[in-house]
Every structure is written in C-alpha cells, then in structure tokens.
Image (spheres, rainbow, N blue to C red):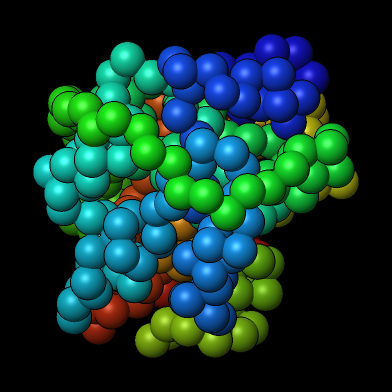
Amino acid sequence: MNASANLMSPEELLRRLGDPELRVIDARFELTDPAWGAAAYAAGHVPGAVYLDLDRDLSSAPGAHGGRHPLPAMDELAAKLGALGVGPEHEVVVYDQSGTMYSARAWWLLRYAGHERVRVLDGGLAAYQAAGGELVTEAPAHPPTAFPLRLRPEMVVDVTHVREALGDPEVLLLDARAPERYRGEVEPLDKKAGHIPGALNRHFLASLKDGRFRTREELARALAPAAGKAEVIAYCGSGVSGAHLVLALEEAGYGGAKLYAGSWSDWSSYDDLPVAVGDEG
C-alpha cells in the first residue's frame, strides 16, 4: 500500500520508537470483557504507549437515548490527553489488538478534537509483534502538556439529522455491522433488529485482508456507492466500528464521511422511528 495519512505500518512504528515527536496510544478493549484492555496494557504494551479505555475515556455513560457508547465529554478527554503527554506538537499513532474498531474510535475522536496528525497502526498489536516488536510493562512518564480542543462538529451527526436525511438521494447511509444484524435476522445487543431504511451494508471487517487494510483501489470499488454523494453517513451499533468505516472511506478516497455517533443503539431506542429488514445492498 502507498503511504497513508491515516495508517502507519508496524515497520515504521518500529523505526520510530523513542521519537520524542511521536506519541503512541494503546486502545485495546473487548466488549465482552471490559476489564481486559487495561489488564492487557499492564501485562505488556508498545514502549512509550499510554492507555485509553473505550468505556472510561472514549465514551460517556449511556442514557435512555444516545446509544451504548455516547461520545465522551471532549473537554475531559482533552485534559486527559494533555496529562498523558499528548499535545499538538505530537504525531499520534493508535493501536488495538488487531487494527480494527477500538483504535479507529480513538483515531476518529482525536480528529474530531482537531488533531489531524493521527494514524492507526495497520494490523494492530498483532502485526507489530509479527514484525519483531517487543512489549514492555513500564508505564511511560511523558511530561504533561496542553491539548487544545478545536472541535470539528461537521464530522458527526445525530438522530435528528439522520431522520431528516431519509429518502434524500444525495445522502448515503452505510451500516458497518455484520450482515445478519443489518438484515435484522439477529440482534444480540439492542432493542430492535434491522437497520435504518435506505442504508447499505458495508461490514467494517470487509475493509481488511489478512488483518491489514485493503488497497486504496480495492476499498474504492467496495465503497463505490459513496462516489458523488453530497453526504455520506456511517453508523454501526454504537459508534465504534462505524469509525472504522469512516477510516476505510478516507483510505478509499471518499473523504469527509460523517459518523452517526449514537448509531443503531440510539435509533432503535426511539419507538417512532422506522426500521427496515432484509437486504438493500
């Protein structure tokens, strides 16, 4: 793959370990075992990496609406980043266990906060270790800094925006969930089964091949319905794997996609919103 503004290879990370201008964020997490990520970090992480937890740091507490992983209070996230030694002077690379949705959520949030120089480690920690990378248990002692918050509200939409966009031929909705959840055949987590009417299914894991992102050309073909649309909105179950789909769209050359942060867990929490089942594409 050609050099990417959104992805870092494990080989580049290995070359740059110890670079004072680089900050590394460990975003490992497991939905079925929320304590796993922090424990995995303590057991061994990339040298210099700091840890951000999906539930504690990259989300706020859920309510009746807004989804299972509402966006965090961004001023609190900015303060936490600064305390961990992450500032505007740094390039940031984020990793999780396999280069998928947890690192993409952190990547998206840093961009939403106004920090453009952030990339995801392609292939995650598994690829880093396969390339010869070693782990350490020592927590870094980066000097604290200030992380200025420059929010980009154009990157995110809410339930009202999505409802008003239904039926608009210039707006494309992409659902990042597994096909069987999109079709409404199963729903293990949320109130209703199905998808937002008119949405097409593009499972986020289909953007990967052998654990790494597909080429720009492959992604562009798979995400071709985004071409020429005035607005592309990605969503998933709770705004986590949807961020991975936004990343795939960026890699495909379809920049500017928005994230419906509340996603299906928000949409399905409203009794009056329409639900579609079956395959729309």
Q: Residue at x 54, y 86 (%)?
A: 188
Nearer to the camera, 54 or 129 = 129
In the rendered image, the vertical position of residue 30 relative to residue 251, given as above or below: below
Nearer to the camera, 6 or 25 = 25
8 to the left or right of 232: right
In the rendered image, the vertical position of residue 11 relative to residue 96, given as above or below: above
Nearer to the camera, 69 or 198 = 69
Where in the figure is residue 29, as x and y percent of width and height? 53, 64
The number of callouts visible is 0
Where in the figure is residue 75, as x and y percent of width and height? 12, 43
Can residue 131 be seen by looking at this rendering? yes
Q: Residue at x 47, y 76 (%)?
A: 34
Image quarter (top left, top right, bottom left or bottom right) of the N terminus? top right
Where in the figure is residue 214, as x and y percent of width and height? 78, 34
15 to the left or right of 29: right
Q: Seen from this angle, which residue lies furthest left?
A: 75
Where in the figure is residue 195, as x and y percent of width and height? 48, 68
Q: Residue at x 35, y 67 (%)?
A: 55
Q: Quadrant of residue 2?
A: top right
In the rendered image, the vertical position of residue 45 relative to residue 179, given as above or below: above
Q: Quadrant of residue 150?
A: top left
Q: Residue at x 73, y 31 (%)?
A: 10
